[in-house]
Amino acid sequence: MTGTILGVGPGVFILAVVWVLTLLLCMLLSRASGFARFSVILVFFAAVIITLTLLLFPRAGKLPAPVTEIKIVDTFFIGRFILLFILTVVFLGCLFLLLTHHLLQPVYAKPLRS
């Protein structure tokens, strides 16, 4: 539903503007004298015709378009597992080197004082 404000389409706002302008014009023309005073009827009927036109000829269909479900596909699936495998091998290699160089390092006996 693109183009909606507060869940209401632009047609409702167009109708609101048309009728607000019609009300203002009718109030202004009701104060006029002579033939301009009777043009209130023309303004009112023009607003009715615009409203009926907008209501009877809608832009969108009555049924909404079917929503297509977006499928997310991981195209780097195999590459991601290869990277995970390489990281695991490197981690295990580093752990092995840590064990061989740090934990299995020989500890020499300290000489006794004589």
Image: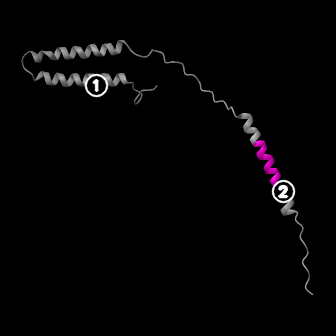
The stretch drawn in magenta includes residue 86: yes
Inter-mark Cα distance, 2 to 1: 78 Å
Of the 4 image quadrants, the one containing the C terminus is bottom right
Image quadrant assignment for residue 59: top left
49 left or right of 31 in image: right
Which mark is first along the chain, 1 or 2? 1
At a point 72% along the width and 38% down the height, the residue shown is 80
Report the mark closest to the observer, 2 or 1.
2
The residue at which mark 2 appears reads as 97
Categorize mark 1 by other alpha carbons within 10 Å: few (<14), some (14-19), many (20+): few
**Percent position (x, y) of residue 4?**
41, 27
Would you place residue 23 above or below residue 91 in this image?
above
Q: Where residue 17 is drawn, which disc sits there?
A: 1
Which SS type dominates the magenta stretch? helix
Range drawn in magenta? 84-99
Instruction: Indicate left or right for 16 with 111 as reference.
Output: left
Q: Amino acid at mark 1?
A: Val
Q: Is residue 26 left or right of residue 90?
A: left
**Residue at 14% of width from left, 16% of height from top?**
39
Residue in the foreground of this view, choosing between 105 and 33: 105
Q: Nearer the viewer, residue 28 or 86?
A: 86
Q: As shown in the figure, which amino acid type bears the numbered disc 2? A: Leu
* Residue 97, image x, y percentages: 84, 56
User: Mark number for residue 68?
Assistant: none
Residue sitting at x 16%, y 17%: 40
